[in-house]
């Protein structure tokens, strides 16, 4: 059983979501809360979560079935859908999101759990990121934006442009309203624009993802000039960052701030801080005497509910999904593919189970770049995931098993080498995202050279009689355990002072394969956990083939069960 954030006594613990929901943005519509987050090259794209109390969250939809643009038929690690925003205006939901190589897009829907419009590009890139729309009291609309140095050679500036109130197409060139270069607010990004008591507020993180702080800018005019205060810092806590998020109010007049913390291998997990106002400035977290900012809290009071469910009671319909018995007819919303997917990759059996069809894989393509890896986020700091697979329908030349995908990645799978010959294959690899490695590589163009992987493969034969006795059913296990904690020097700030991320967990991942009633595992592989390109490590399953076939074999994923080891 996985532990939740709701303590069921009117209190909650942080994080409210131990999952890689980076760059969260949140709105309230009536008594309902909705959250969106980044999804990068995974599809479906842009998860939409729903809550009634800001503590218990559940994925209810994805904004985009597929990532716009053809290049995302293959994994393009670190690219794709970055930090989105969600807003509600004139009975319609808007989600605006950046793709830093392509531009800014918008999707719309009357029903957040239903169909969303196809993405429309409203601003061409590259370089524009972190857009957020805002409608003023007089009906005028604006977009606030940041920029990505890696795409346009500029950073640490916030831009605003007037926009069409319905379509959000910009009406003029963006204007710089704040420049954080050569200040304590270098790398300012992720802006969210609000209005309160006649002031325009831009909430934005600065100082870097892993060791930065939260800034709020304030002005009487939407185009400034803006003054600023730092309103949330790590202080003496272990919550490094704290990074990009959203201010949200409740129907009962309470204020909270949701943001993420980068815990490295585990990804960017979501915290919620109580928030108060003092002299028309927000103070987030636990206020510190004599300071304009607060520190992150570990425990706090749950928001008061405006409905008939007490704030001392967990609403079980809003707990995240992790386990899966694959009863169909659709994949559970905890799953995403490694790239834009094809419906032909999977189906559901008449008696249950997910049928993963063996998709052709080029020999030179490393496991990390396989298109049809079916993945989900880590659900806890330490956990065990057991996946039961029926591999009796694999054809010769086909492989199926489990994967742990990060910068360090590993797979453990059964390979059918011949009619009566089977092997357990372990793969260990490392992705290198450096520009130097990519320029030196002869990597095929299918992955746009966003990373270069080097991997090693080992195999051991497995007797067919043993597989027959086990009815070709193999139990694959992923175990994640924290071995120690470390401090990391992240960078030097604009004054040359060292900025450290403290008490970062160092996890070890072990993949194991075994059959029922056999005391010893058939094989295992162990690697240190390392985050991917802007994303946490993911667990998943796959089935691929060395051959192109019109009717390939398949593996049946019977169930996936998680348990907490914390």
Image (spheres, rainbow, N blue to C red):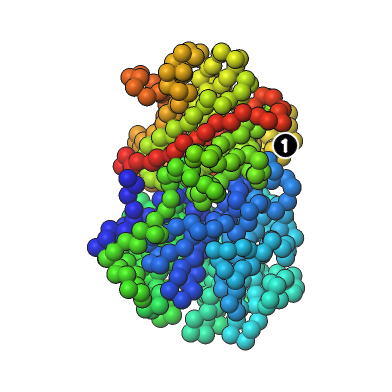
Of 299 and 495, the residue lying toward us: 299
Of 479 and 313, the residue lying toward us: 313
Residue at 53% x, 79% y: name it. 195
Residue at 72% x, 54% y: name it. 102
Estimate how packed mark 1 is, as few (under 14), some (14 to 19) or many (20 or more) residues with alpha carbons within 10 Å. Answer: some
Horizontal and vertical percent for residue 27?
50, 69
Of 356 and 179, the residue lying toward us: 356
Residue at the limit of the structure toward the left, as seen here: 9
Quadrant of residue 440 within the rendered picture: top right
Tell me if I can see residue 20 in this picture: yes
Residue 485, compared with residue 131, is above or below; it is above
Horizontal and vertical percent for residue 258?
44, 63
Quadrant of residue 342 within the rendered picture: top right
Q: Which residue is mark 1?
A: 446
Horizontal and vertical percent for residue 249?
43, 74
Residue 499, compared with residue 507, is above or below; it is below
Residue at 40% x, 35% y: name it. 386
Q: In this figure, what is the number of numbered marks?
A: 1
Q: Quadrant of the C terminus?
A: top left
Q: Quadrant of the N terminus?
A: top left
Horizontal side of residue 243 vs 565, given as left or right: right
Residue 324, compared with residue 237, is above or below; it is above
Identify the element where label 1 is drawn.
Answer: helix
Of 257 and 96, the residue lying toward us: 96
Residue at 60% x, 74% y: name it. 92
Horizontal and vertical percent for residue 327?
48, 45
Tell me if I can see residue 244 in this picture: no
Horizontal side of residue 485 vs 349, given as left or right: left
């Amino acid at each position: 059983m996985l532990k939740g954030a709701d303590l069921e006594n009117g209190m909650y613990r942080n994080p409210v979501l131990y999952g890689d929901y980076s760059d969260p943005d949140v709105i309230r519509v009536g008594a309902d809360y909705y959250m969106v987050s980044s999804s990068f090259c995974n599809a479906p794209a842009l998860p939409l979560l729903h809550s009634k109390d800001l503590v218990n969250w559940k994925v209810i939809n994805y904004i985009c079935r597929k990532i716009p643009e053809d290049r995302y038929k293959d994994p393009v690690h670190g690219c794709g859908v970055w930090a989105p925003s969600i807003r509600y205006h004139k009975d319609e939901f808007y989600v605006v999101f950046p793709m830093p190589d392509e531009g800014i897009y918008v999707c719309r829907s009357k029903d957040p759990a239903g169909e969303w419009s196809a993405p429309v590009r409203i601003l061409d890139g590259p370089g524009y990121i972190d857009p957020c729309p805002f409608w003023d009291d007089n009906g005028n609309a604006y977009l606030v934006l940041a920029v990505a140095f890696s795409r346009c050679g500029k950073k640490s500036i916030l831009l605003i442009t007037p926009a069409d109130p319905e379509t959000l197409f910009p009406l003029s060139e963006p204007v710089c309203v704040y420049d954080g270069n050569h200040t304590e607010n270098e790398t300012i990004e992720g802006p969210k624009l609000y209005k309160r008591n006649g002031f325009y507020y831009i909430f934005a993180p600065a100082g870097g993802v892993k060791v930065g702080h939260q800034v709020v800018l304030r002005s009487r005019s939407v185009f400034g000039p803006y003054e600023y205060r730092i309103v949330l810092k790590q202080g003496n806590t272990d919550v490094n960052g704290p990074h990009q998020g959203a201010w949200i109010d409740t129907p009962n007049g309470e204020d909270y701030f949701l943001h993420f913390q980068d815990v490295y291998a585990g990804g960017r997990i979501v915290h919620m801080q109580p928030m108060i106002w003092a002299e028309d400035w927000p103070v987030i977290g636990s206020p510190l005497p004599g300071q304009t900012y607060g520190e992150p809290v570990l425990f706090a009071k749950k928001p008061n509910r405006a409905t008939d469910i007490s704030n001392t009671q967990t609403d079980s319909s809003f707990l995240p999904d992790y386990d899966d018995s694959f009863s169909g007819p659709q994949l559970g919303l905890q799953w995403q593919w490694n790239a834009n997917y094809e419906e032909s990759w999977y189906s559901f059996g008449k008696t249950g189970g997910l049928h993963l069809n063996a998709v052709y894989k080029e020999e030179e393509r490393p496991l990390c770049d396989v298109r049809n890896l079916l993945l989900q986020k880590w659900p806890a700091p330490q956990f065990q995931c057991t996946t039961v697979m029926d591999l009796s329908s694999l054809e010769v030349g086909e492989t199926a098993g489990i994967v742990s995908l990060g910068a360090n990645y590993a797979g453990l799978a059964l390979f059918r080498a011949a009619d009566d010959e089977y092997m357990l294959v372990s793969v260990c690899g490392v992705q290198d995202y450096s520009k130097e490695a990519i320029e030196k590589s002869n990597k095929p163009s299918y992955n746009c050279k966003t990373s270069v992987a080097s991997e090693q493969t080992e195999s051991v034969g497995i007797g067919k009689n043993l597989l027959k006795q086990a009815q070709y059913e193999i139990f694959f296990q992923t175990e994640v355990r924290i071995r120690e904690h470390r401090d990391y020097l992240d960078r030097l700030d604009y004054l040359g002072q060292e900025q450290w991320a403290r008490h970062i967990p160092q996890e070890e991942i072990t993949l194991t394969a075994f059959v029922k009633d056999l005391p010893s595992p058939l094989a295992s592989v162990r690697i240190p956990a390392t985050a991917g390109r802007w994303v946490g490590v993911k667990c998943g399953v796959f089935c691929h083939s060395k051959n192109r076939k019109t009717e390939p074999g398949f593996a049946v994923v019977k169930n996936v069960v998680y348990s907490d080891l914390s």
